[in-house]
Amino acid sequence: MFAAAVILCALLVVLAALHVLWACRIWYPLKHVAQLARDVAGFPWAEKMPPPLACAFVALVLIIGAGRLFWPQGTLRSLGLIGRVTVFALLGLAAYTPQWRKLTPTEPFARLDRRYYGPLCLFLSALAALAL
């Protein structure tokens, strides 16, 4: 479905832009790096954001994933979408497992994960499935 691909593309581009900001060491939406690291990752020991290269790599993967949505129908496009469905579904479901909560107990991450991050990942997974 073309509409699902367009919505998924837009969301992936927004997420990529956020990672580009972090790669440039712009701590949006929070100004304090340690608080942002804990809010984004949820690990109690997180004091720093990942290195710029790691943030840039995630941004690149997201942009490539957004662009590949508009490849012609075929095996490579389908495999990419199946991979996105799987990854986003696992990330979304993890937000509700006790094992993940033990690893990432920091507030407000735990609350944000259950309320926003997990559902967003499940929504992205559903959009990727619809775009198949």
Image (cartoon, rainbow, N blue to C red):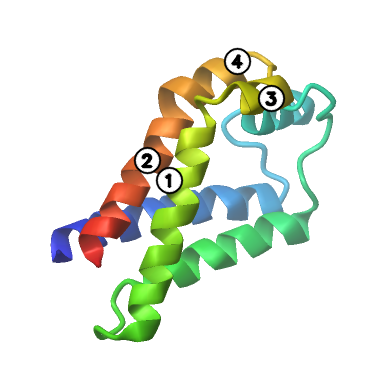
Q: Callout 1: helix, strand or loop? A: helix
Residue behind mark 2: 122
Residue closer to the observer: 125 or 112: 125
Q: Amino acid at mark 4?
A: Pro
* Circle 1 crowding by C-alpha within 10 Å: few under 14, some 14–19, many from 20: many
Please report the residue visible at 66 percent of the width from the left and 61 percent of the height from the top. 56
Give the percent coordinates (x, y) of residue 80: 42, 72
Left or right of residue 67: residue 6: left
| Marks 2 & 1, CB-CB < 8 Å contact | yes
Which element carries disc 4, helix, strand or loop? loop
Residue drawn at x 50%, y 62% as measured from the top left? 62
Q: Earlier in the sequence, mark 2 or mark 1?
A: 1
Marking on residue 108: 4
Label 3 and label 2: CA atoms lie apart by: 19 Å
Residue 99: which numbered mark, if any? none
**57 w.r.t. 120: above or below:** below
Report the amino acid beneath label 3: Thr
The relative height of residue 13 versus residue 69 in the rendered view (above or below) is above
Residue with the mark numbered 3:
104
Identify which residue, 41 or 78, lies in the foreground. Answer: 78
Which residue is labeled 1 in the image?
89
Indicate which disc, 4 or 1, sits on the residue closer to the N terminus: 1
Real-space Cα distance between discs 1 and 3? 18 Å
